[in-house]
Image (cartoon, grey):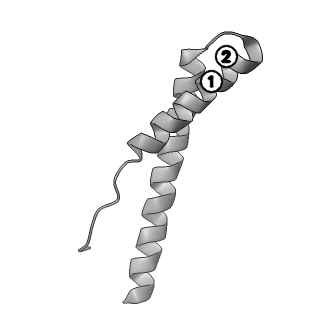
Amino acid sequence: MAGSPVRFPIAEGFGIFVAIAAADVLIAGEVNLFKASLIAAGAAIVLYLARRRLLANRRRHLH
């Protein structure tokens, strides 16, 4: 398949991590970095797989 590859969403994952950590501080008054990193990593993987699938479907329908 020619074309630009799908890049892993590092910035989005970091943004999710910061948002989860901030929500923990606001709600519980403390930060659980392990929970925030697990949720952010899982969300980044889901975003990556969704983008990859959408790009593959778009390429398939164009040809």
Look at label 1 and name its amino acid: Ala
Residue, far left = 2
Q: For this view, does 25 lie left or right of residue 14? A: right
What residue is rendered at 71% in x and 10% in y? 29
Residue, far top = 30
Pick the front one: 17 or 43: 17
Mark 2 lies on a secondary structure that is helix
Badge 1: how crowded within 10 Å, few (<14), some, or many (20+)? some
Residue, far right = 27
What residue is rendered at 47% in x and 65% in y? 53
* Picture quadrant where residue 23 is located: top right
Q: Please identify the quadrant where the C terminus is shown.
A: bottom left
Q: Which residue is mark 2?
A: 25
Look at label 2 and name its amino acid: Val
* Picture quadrant where residue 42 is located: top right
Q: Which residue is mark 1?
A: 22
Q: CA distance from mark 1 to mark 2?
A: 5 Å
Give how far across and how far down residue 26 sits, in percent: 72, 19
Q: Is residue 43 above or below residue 54?
A: above
> Given contact means CB atoms under 8 Å apart, are the residues at marks 1 and 2 in contact?
yes
What residue is rendered at 61% in x and 14% in y? 32
